Amino acid sequence: MKLVQDLKDGSSKEKTAAAAEIRHLTINNVENRVHIGRCGAITPLLSLLYSEEVLTQEHAVTALLNLSISEVNKAMIAEAGAIEPLVHVLNTGNDRAKENSAATLFSLSVLQVNRERIGQCNAAIQALVNLLGKGTFRGKKDAASALFNLSITHENKARIVQAKAVKHLVELLDPELEMVDKAVALLANLSAVGEGRQAIVREGGIPLLVETVDSGSQRGKENAASVLLQLCLNSPKFCTLVLQEGAIPPLVALSQSGTQRAKEKVKSITKPSPVSCCGLDI
């Protein structure tokens, strides 16, 4: 395939043009994604992620993002050693390239084996957390999505917390930033580990979580209640802080009008428990 040959052996200009054409051909065409992946485009595209030409790097990472939508290509891209080059883009690329690098990691992390691969690369998690804190709006969303997938794997939860993600996630609970649902969903996963719970409290997350239970979306309410549940069940001290922030009225409302899942979360918080101080009858 000439495009792949140009990626491998062409001049700098030809490589850029080939990456741009593959980017275009794989936007919406499923067959092109599979065919181009099988023709050997992945490895030379990964090499172009180290290009000092900003546009070349952007075309290459976007082409890889498009290719990664194919289930067959997800494994091939990761097995070809994609993690470190994608991290390089997260650290050096322009805004669009960073966004698409995070989106590619999100796409790859659909597979459990790739979640493990990415999680074992501390630089990948740190780069995603940096984008979560300082990226564009879309960059923050893509980083949050990738980190959420990674957090499904238990070992990655502590790694994400240690990369200081919770500080940014608590900041993103501000409704004006339009990231509450993504932030609280990731916090719900991170609250399953002790380091996560401690960080949530330390970063001042409880008041914003209570606010989310009170006025967030239905999914946001459920996930915020899930975080509060973890705090209450695992620490009487944290439970007292939850109560002091006025959590009971919004939890009462959620227990009456929420989904069955939300009602179960509230019931778990408020029922008498040997490890919780929150056994209040509502």
Image (spheres, rainbow, N blue to C red):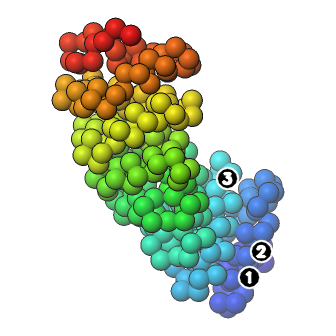
Toward the viewer: 35 or 282?
A: 282
Name the residue: 55% across, 83% down. Answer: 51
Give the residue pinned by disc 2. 21
Toward the viewer: 70 or 145?
A: 145
Q: Amino acid at mark 2?
A: Glu
Using residue 59 as the reference point, say whether residue 128 is left or right of it. left
Name the residue: 43% across, 33% down. Answer: 224
Toward the viewer: 58 or 228?
A: 228
Q: Amino acid at mark 1?
A: Ala
Name the residue: 45% across, 46% down. Answer: 173
Which label was assigned to residue 105? Answer: none
In this rendering, the count of numbered labels is 3
Density class for disc 2 (Cα within 10 Å; few <14, some 14-19, many ≥20) is some
Give the residue pinned by disc 1. 17
The answer to the question of whether label 2 and label 1 lie on touching residues, with beta carbons closer than 8 A, is yes
Q: Of the two numbered discs 2 and 3 on the same chain, state the one appearing first in sequence.
A: 2
Q: CA distance from mark 2 to mark 1?
A: 6 Å
> Which image quadrant: the C terminus?
top left
Residue 62 sits in which quadrant? bottom right
The answer to the question of whether label 1 and label 3 lie on touching residues, with beta carbons closer than 8 A, is no
Residue 99 seen: yes
Give the residue pinned by disc 3. 69
